[in-house]
Image (cartoon, rainbow, N blue to C red):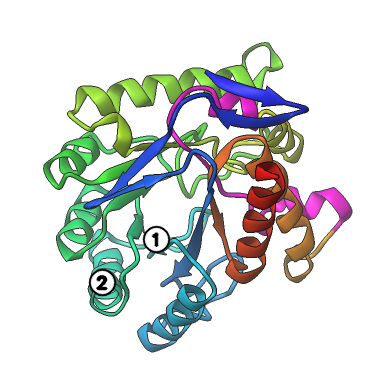
Amino acid sequence: MHARVAGVVRPATTLQLALGDRLLDVTTRALVMGVLNRTPDSFYDRGATFELDDLLRRAEQIVDEGADLLDVGGVKAGPGPEVTAEEELDRVVPTVEALAARFDVPISVDTWRATVAEAAFAAGAVLGNDISGFADPRYLEVAANANASVVATHIRLAPRIADPDPLYPDDDVVAAVESYLRERIARAHAAGIDASRVVIDAGLDLGKSAAQSLELLRASDRLAAVGPPLLLSASNKTFIGALLGLGIGERRDASLAAAALGVARGCRIVRVHDVAGTRRVVDAIEQVLAA
C-alpha cells in the first residue's frame, strides 16, 4: 500500500532495493540511473560513447554529477541492423569490467539475452535491466545464480520490432501493464529472486503510443502501489517529443518535467541521459516533500 497526499505518493512502509552487497533505502529518495550506450546507433547520442575510452570519460562525468547507478547497453531497443550475441558480449563485458574497476557505483546491464547477462554479472554488474519481460527462459535462472537484481519491463511485442499501432484490451493500457508486471514479479520470485531484488518498469514507448505512454506516466502512483521499486525510463523518448513537437536535441526540459512528475508520484529510479539536471530535480523534490 502507498500513502497519498495531494497526488504525491510515498510507500506506507520502508522500501528497500538490494544491488549486489548494497541494501538501499528508496522509501523517500529516488535513485538516478545514468545511461551509457556502447552502440553506434543509439537514438539519442548516435554513437558518441561507442568507443570504450569515450564511454569511460562519460561515466566519470556522470558519476561526478551524482549517478547512483550506471546502465550499460550494447544494443539499442528499436529496429536496426542485427547485433549478434557475440557482438553484444564484445561491447558489454569489457565495459562492465572497466567500470567496476574504476567506480564504486552499482552497474546495470541493459540486455534481454541471458548469455550476455550472465557474462556481465560475472564481470561485475549487479542488475539485469531486461526490456523483454524475461523472454529468454534462462534470464531469471542466470540472475538468481548470480544473486543479481532484475528489472521486469512491460513490452507488447519484443525488442527491435516496430509496433506502430499498439492495442490493449478494453483500451486500458494501465490495467494491461499492471497485470503483466504482477505476473513477471511472480515469475521472478518463483525463480528464487528475493523481493528486494526486483524492480518494475512500465516500458514507456515500448509498444505504446505517445498517448498511452503519457497515460502510464500519469498512473505512476497506481503502478508504484504494485510493490517493487518503479523505474521510470522517459528521458528524451518519442512521447516526450510529441508533447510539444520537440526534436531529439530539444527534449531536456520536458524530460526533467517527466522525471519530476514520476518521482512525485512514486517512481524510485529514473533512467536518464541528463544526470546533473535530474539529480537536482530529484534532490529538490525530496527536500520539498520532507519540509
Side (left or right) of 260 relative to 112: right
* Vertical order, 61 against 224 (above or below): below
- Report the residue that reaches farthest toward the left: 145
Residue found at x 24% / y 69%? 93
Identified by mark 2, the residue type is Ala
Label 2, residues with CA under 10 Å away: few <14, some 14-19, many ≥20: some
Residue denoted by label 2: 100
Q: What SS does tag 1 mark? A: loop
Vertical arrangement, residue 59 with respect to residue 161, above or below: below
Q: What stretch is highlighted in magenta?
A: 220-245
Q: Which residue is drawn at 29% across and 44% down?
A: 149
Q: Does the magenta stretch include residue 226?
A: yes
Q: Which residue is drawn at 16% across and 37% down?
A: 141
Percent across and percent down for residue 123 are 18, 65
Label 2 with label 1: CB-CB less than 8 Å: no
For residue 44, above or below residue 166: below
**Residue type at numbered disc 1:** Glu
Q: Which of 8 and 131 is in front in this view?
A: 8
